[in-house]
Image: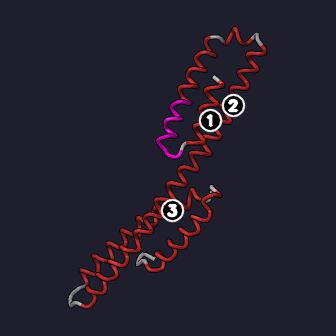
Amino acid sequence: HIDELTDIAKGISRANSSEALDKISKELARQDLMFDSYFSAHMNEFADNSSIMTAVAKYKENRSAVDEKFTARSTYVTAVKAVGEASSCIDKADSLYAKLFKQAQRYSMAKQSSKLLEKVKAKEQMAFAKIQAKYDAAASTAGTIPELENEFLDLEEKFTNISAISCLQ
């Protein structure tokens, strides 16, 4: 079981998606079930054998280390995904804001255009709310991953620029 646990630990390092981590989580659960079932069935035999109890303790120690590694990798994958989604959303916002600005300019020149301007404002508010949510998700996880610091600082600057022109601010 220790060799299988070592193989699973190697897989954690290579996992780059939530799906891959879910697969590993299921494999760990299967491993735990097998170990717990076997240990429970033979507990009385093992209790008198110090070398087996030492091996069990080592397995549990290794299993704990794998849990820590899994949690760290899961946090990393979540943060990378959140920063990527926020960056993509903010990058797309440039063209959306340019389009909305042109519409607002055009509508402001027309008589009785307040309803049209309100629609433009509502579109901008919805867009900014989406951007804000993506940015907040990235901010909540990116701070825990030093490798994402530079990318997040760039994202933060772009978000600040969009915030400055948003009608929600």
Q: Label 1 neighbourhood size at 10 Å, few (<14), some (14-19), many (20+)?
A: many
User: Where is residue 124 shown, x and y percent of the image?
Assistant: 36, 73
Amino acid type assigned to the residue bearing label 1 in the image? Ala
Tag 2 residue: 62
Task: For the residues labelled 1 and 2, say whether their Cβ atoms are less than 8 Å apart.
Answer: yes
**Quarter-of-image position of residue 54:** top right
Horizontal side, residue 67 vs residue 24: left or right: right
Q: Which residue lies under the disc numbered 1?
A: 9
Image point (63%, 57%), residue name: 147
The answer to if 10 sits in the magenta stretch is no
Residue denoted by label 3: 136
Q: Earlier in the sequence, mark 3 or mark 2?
A: 2
Residues tagged 3 and 2 counted as in contact (Cβ below 8 A): no
Q: CA distance from mark 1 to mark 3?
A: 31 Å
Estimate how packed mark 2 is, as few (under 14), some (14 to 19) or many (20 or more) residues with alpha carbons within 10 Å: some
The amino acid beneath tag 2 is Asn
Q: Mark 1 or 3 closer to N-term?
A: 1
Q: Is residue 56 left or right of residue 164?
A: right
Would you place residue 64 above or below residue 112 in this image?
Answer: above
